[in-house]
Image: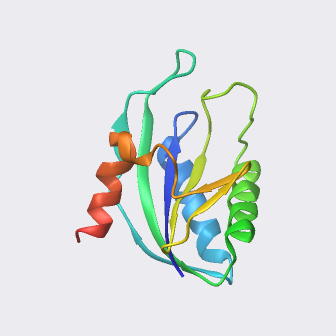
Amino acid sequence: MRCYIGVGSNLGDRQRNIEQAIEMLKANKGIEVKKVSPLYETDPVEGPEQPKYLNGAIEIETKLEPKELLDVIHDIEDLLGRKRIVRNGPRTIDLDILTYGDKKINEPDLKIPHPRMAEREFVQRPLSDLTNA
């Protein structure tokens, strides 16, 4: 299944955090990373005052089911030191499933397509780099 994942970081070595997340995705046998967008520096949206983000998008092919993919990206976030203390707070890494093929899922812990992706420039710009390439 073709999926798009949003990626962002605004703590520590932002570029290195994103590179490590991509390498961890590549290391998973159920995921093939196809393309990675350029990274863009963006201002935080919502939440407390915090540093600027680096944001991008990743195109993957996966054999994993949506919930399995969510578990994998949460594991990667945990391994890279993500702390979920403040909603929309700063983070070492943020991975979001933007789309999962044409599937629509609306569950408390998983919403696909991502509900706010159309209104967020920091998602749309890197995503369009991948889908219009």
The answer to whether 23 is drawn above or below residue 88 in the figure is below
Q: In which quarter of the image is residue 105?
A: bottom right
Residue 107, given in percent of the width and then of the height, sits at 71, 54
Pick the front one: 6 or 83: 6
Give the quadrant of the N terminus. bottom right
Residue 98, given in percent of the width and then of the height, sits at 50, 58
The answer to whether 50 is drawn above or below residue 112 in the figure is above
Q: Is residue 97 left or right of residue 72?
A: left
- Residue, far top: 49
Q: In this view, does 123 lie to the left or right of 17?
A: left
Residue at (67% x, 69% y) in the render: 66
Structure colour scheme:
rainbow
Residue at (55% x, 64% y) in the render: 22
Pick the front one: 58 or 114: 114
Residue 36, given in percent of the width and then of the height, sits at 40, 66
Residue 17, given in percent of the width and then of the height, sits at 57, 49
Pick the front one: 3 or 107: 107
Residue at (76% x, 53% y) in the render: 79
Q: Is residue 66 left or right of residue 3?
A: right
Residue at (35% x, 61% y) in the render: 37
- Residue, far left: 132
